[in-house]
Amino acid sequence: MAGIDGIDFLQLDMPAILLAVLAAVACAIPGNFLVLRRQSLLGDAISHVVLPGIVIGFLLSGTTSTWPMLLGAGAAAIVAVALIELVRRLSGLESGAVMGIVFTSMFAAGVLILERSEARNVHIDVQHALYGNIEGTVWLEPASIRDLLDPAILATTPGEIARLAVVVLVIAVLVVAFFKELRITTFDPGLAATLGFSPGLVSAGLVLLAALAAVAAFDAVGSILVIAMFVCPPAIARHLTDHLAMQVVLSVVAAVAAALSGYVLAAFVPLWLGYGHAFNVAGAMAVTAGLMLAVVMLFAPRYGWLARRLAGSRSAGVAGSPGTVAD
Amino acid sequence: MDGRGTSGWSTAAVHLLPQGDTPDIPPALEVSGLTVVYDRKPALWDISYRSPTEGLVAIVGPNGAGKSTFLKAVLGLVPRVSGKVELLGEPAGKVRGRIGYVPQRTAVDWSFPTTALDVVAMGLYGRIGWLRPVRRHHLARARRYLADVGMEAFADRQIGQLSGGQQQRVFLARALAQEASVYFMDEPLVGVDAATESVIFDILRRLRRDGRTVFCVHHDLQSVSRHFDHVLILNMRSFAAGPVDRVFTAENLQEAYGGRLAPGELSGLRLSG
Amino acid sequence: MIGELLPILLLQGGYNTTIVCIGAAMLGAASGMAGSFALLRKRAMVSDAISHATLPGVCLGFIAALWFIGAGRSLPFILAGAALSAMAGVVLVDLVRRSDRLGEDSAIAVVLSTFYGLGMVLLSYIQTLPTAGQAGLEGMLLGATAGMLRFEAEMIAIAALVLLVVTILLFKELGLVCFDPEFARAGGWPVRLLDLLIMSLVTGVVVIGLKTVGLVLIVALLVIPPAAALYWSRRLAPMVFTAALIAAAGAYVGAAISASAPDLPTGPVIVLTLAALFVFSLLFAPKRGLVVAMIALVRHRMTIAERQGLLALATRRSVSQPLSRVLLLRRGWMDAAGNATTGGLSQARLVQRDQALWDRYLLDYPEDAFACREWSMRFIEEVLPGDLVAELDRRTVEASLRTGGV
């Protein structure tokens, strides 16, 4: 590990990695259900409307401190989701198109307000919302690995890390607690309704959870990584298992792996190659997540392209399509 | 004119009272004035119907006659413009735990990451209730229901990798797991092989023996008189209803299907009257 | 601001501004048409993946231009790169979608985020290069027409015109694929190729729109106008041309407003103009607009309630629906005690006879009756031809004689 010394790693790299991993996990867990419900683009919509949210949050509070912005972003996410549902019901258009209409309009409004207001003189810019600022996270207090066990030093954990850790915990607890309800409303909303599990209520809860993850994560990692982590880890896991609980667990593993390898790719590889600058970390993580998915789609043991080709040449019946396996 | 509402449809309800019904046991299903509109077009018009207290009821009628819509409207899955629905003598919302529903097979995402056993266990969710997890003994119970339909060997198979008939059996096992008093099944016999068909009819007979009521949207007129006790002929309106031996007549069918049944088709049926 | 806007709208805001406005209008027309085909093919949001997938191409184009001509900020290089990487995105969305494990929505999100992530990595690389002139790339995000070179504005206008012409020439083929792909395939049409063509047109619009509207918002230009146009017509040609008109008007007015004052970025202004047009269409379009639809829905419910109420009166049952009671009372067909008045009784007889005819129609022509929107909604004579009604009347009388009648 030439060029990386221990203290730098502890104070600069470790907080960034921690942040990215937490953000990835926060998004990946609810992402499983969005992917199965064919609502992956909701993550896209939510992460785009975060911008108007933070602009309004700034204009109302007059400060660039974190909480007004997060509240603004959260409010914007809820407004966007409600608008999407409203327009979808009123218009009868397909939900993808409705999301496109709502999030582009809200994003446009956000940019316009930003350009027209004094907010542009302060440090809010569109790129920050899109790209995030993982690299900017530092934690100068720990001087050695042993310090990480020291309560006094742990108390100085950077706000965004602590916040994301809490969010991950909340999401994990809620998804475990409502796992049965999420499963049945996703698989068979009709049956869920007749059994008394309101599919509308559970979906609203799921969307709120996704919004919580997106809002907590965008500030640190940017919109694009949020979109990537909603979809790629669940999509990877979906190729590896037929059990829903296992899929959620594997998606978490995939999220962590994508975040770690993305960081290595962006921050360390250029240095090892003798290039003086690091690359954009969030972007590199999104790319690794996509590449991991590509590998899994090609080589997964059962549902990969290769396995299916081999199975297909052995027998005419292809696994995975209903009605082809005989009694 | 047993069970027939002729030109004066509106009086149908009076005739639909099954014979030998004891007044103190409420019918499994009672519908009055049910009207459902899809996209500003009538799909069901002013349907009044009173079912028996138990037994197997076939719901038949031509394509587009609103059979599935009828089930969904009764279960509150589609909004109704007017009308009253009572299940077991109570408003539908109150007896949810005692109602089982087997939707059409096409309505399901077959690549969903779930096994046959998981699907059957879903039938128990209503009994388990909000927030409480599925425990080992629930799964053991689900496994027994899977055995009832001859599918225990496939418990851990992902549902997309079962044949059409096997999938249907799994959904039937899920319905059994609901331990309901009244079942609504939407075309459970479509696209299944002979083996599965006989399993399904065995299960239906068992449910009848246990005093349950099963409403079954059914497309195969040939098997109605052999397997069902009662019939409801739907044609956007409740065309006729009552015991099979009195209502399932050549004349009724001929008329409900708009003369579209060929004489050959009719002669193959074991009809009454 | 208004004082400055008017001359621009009338094309008197200087040569560059005029070309930008005309170019935006043509871009709009092309996007309205290409977007219509994408929406009708239920692939509207693929444009979101396409637009985000341009970013790595933009960066690679910049790097290539730097390599070959020594200056990165070369629009032809950048747009060529954008087009190539966007088409790669289209192909990948299609490949991911084909595996049955993931839906198209996931395919779009995966391609979008992966490509954009790659673009961000490349951007961060470009930012470390010692060369000046990276500012042009930031403009691709949100669109900036201010400071556009004359040659660039002309190029965009011409490219938009070419796209428009290609779309019009292939109108019939594209329409066929959208309407009935199976039929088109059976008829020997190269459906996959035509699908690819639709996505290529979308890509063309996205690439040209980068400079004007920016890559985040170009999606709006492709999705909003066709969605709005669906409220004005459900027939293919009128719908596509309405979408083109809405998009052209929105883009033209938006570009003009943006040129009239500083701090009005072109993309957002165009998108908000389009959003306003969409909301207007959604609410007030004749026939399909919400206001008209709500009125029709209420009328429909009232028609049903009135008819069912009258039918109850005719058979001396009590009128149970509250809405029916209100309507009958107000018409004077029923008194407060729930009994039919004389006028009510004669009206009830009329409706009862009509219902008997409709029921006979249902029995004798079930499939036609299931498909008939007016079934039991109006008097049968107003809907069906006279000789058919007479025949139904005859059969009804026959049937009631046979069974002993009412």
Image (cartoon, coloured by chain):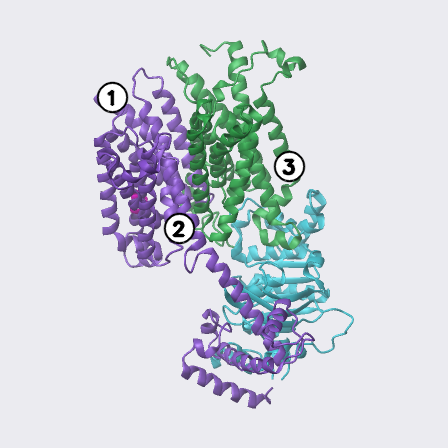
Q: Give the range drawn in magenta.
A: C195-201
**Labelled disc at residue B225:** none
Identified by mark 3, the residue type is Leu
- Chain C pictured colour: purple
Q: Which residue has dot 1 on it? A: C71
In terms of secondary structure, where does tag 1 sit?
Answer: loop
Q: Is residue A45 visible?
A: yes
Give the distance between the C-alpha atoms of the residues marked 3 and 2, in whole angstroms.
39 Å
Of C216 and C111, the residue lying toward us = C216
**Residue A16 shown left or right of residue A273 in the figure:** right
**Which badge, 2 or 1, is on the more N-terminal residue?**
1
Residues at discs 1 and 3 both on one chain? no
Label 3 packing within 10 angstroms: few (<14), some (14-19), many (20+): some
Give the distance between the C-alpha atoms of the residues marked 1 and 3, in whole angstroms.
54 Å
Q: Is residue B201 above or below residue A264?
A: below
Coordinates of residue C342 in the picture (x, y in percent): 61, 83
Q: Quadrant of residue C182?
A: bottom left
Viewer-side label of 2, 1: 2
Coordinates of residue A295 in the picture (x, y in percent): 43, 33
Give the distance between the C-alpha atoms of the residues marked 2 and 1, in whole angstroms.
42 Å
Q: Chain letter for cyan? A: B
Of B153 and A117, the residue lying toward us = A117
**Residue C36 shown left or right of residue A169 in the figure:** left
Q: Which residue has dot 2 on it? A: C228
